[in-house]
Image (tube, rainbow, N blue to C red):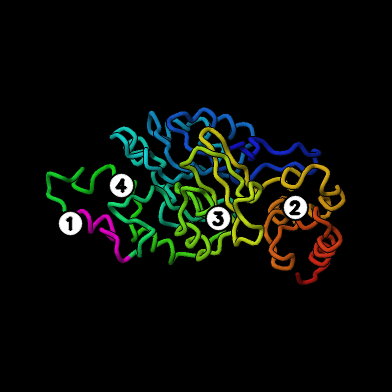
Amino acid sequence: MKPLISSDLHARSEHNQSKPKLMFFGDPHGDLDSVIAAVEHFRPEAIVLLGDIQARRPLHVELRPILDLTEIWFIHGNHDTDSDADYDNLWGSELATRNLHGRIVEIAGYRVAGLGGIFRSKIWDPRRPIEEAAFQSSDAMRRTMKREERWRDGISRKHRSSIFPADYQQLLRSGPSDILVTHEAPAAHPHGWRVIDELAEKLGVQLVVHGHHHQSIDYLAEGMQSAAAPFRAFGVDMGSHLAWPRDPQKETGSEALPQDLLDLAMQVFGAEAPAWLDKPHKLLDGQTPAAFAAGGGLEKVRSMLNAIQYGGVV
């Protein structure tokens, strides 16, 4: 599958150029040099690592060159419990409190929800009702284990990257949110899960970003997701990244949006203009303003911006 997500922002005139608020990085698997290089170049307000980090040293040591350049957040993946070193270099790091798993945190102006780890049928097969899960929580699993079966007096290291129903339900009750980051994929992926969609819909997010499958996928552009879907979804490849908000000119084609519309959006929203242009709007049949304008609705989008600028309600 051909990657559709660009590794950089579309070149713009100096007065319109803005750094991305968020950057999402696909599974590093120990190679964090590309993360450091991208942060040093783009200077995002914050980054999120999408799991399978497998830092070779404590994560704060690996990422020391960018600790003062950006906020660092992460979710864990299944390979982050492959070895004691993988586990300790993540959860033993000074950045361990930046794990988004099971909670919602305001990051760079967005409410970001996180669900790390993977579904394992020994714990919970999400194709079955949640009440039928073998273990509802890690504590429930621990209580069934003999002392000699435990790892560091808890559940096995491997299952510390399993998704338990309690983790999922806690997040389900924690909304609303703007963005959901997961290691597992939503249902649009051939190996994705409907329960990820249900979580995204319950939280009311506009964006779902995942790792795990080592593919860069824009599900809408690939025809794997409808424009009427309640959220947009992206997969991010190993060693690659997604910048957010996306550049509307990159999204619709450099010739699709006239400069005067982009200038008007910048006047109204400033640095938030790309986010507004790229967010589905109920008055545009669920399309983004950028896509609606490019499809022939330029005047309606311009009218909306003028109304907002002069105190109208849209």
Viewer-nearest of discs 2 and 3 = 3
* Kind of residue at badge 1: Arg
Left or right relative to 159: residue 290: right
Q: Residues within 10 Å of mark 2 (few under 14, many from 20)?
A: few
Q: Is residue 26 left or right of residue 165?
A: right
Residue 119, compared with residue 53, is above or below; it is below
Q: Quadrant of the N terminus?
A: top right
Residue 285 in the image, given as x and y percentages of width and height:
72, 66
Q: Residues within 10 Å of mark 4 (few under 14, many from 20)?
A: some
Q: Is residue 136 magenta?
A: yes
Residue at the far bottom: name it.
313
Amino acid found under the numbered disc labelled 3: Ile
- Contact, CB < 8 Å: mark 4 with mark 3? no
The numbered dot on residue 160 is 4
3D distance between C-alphas at marks 4 and 3:
24 Å
Label 4 or label 2, whichever comes before in sequence order: 4
For label 3, the residue is 179
Between marks 2 and 3, how big is the CA–CA gap?
21 Å
Q: Position of residue 306 (x, y in %)?
A: 84, 63
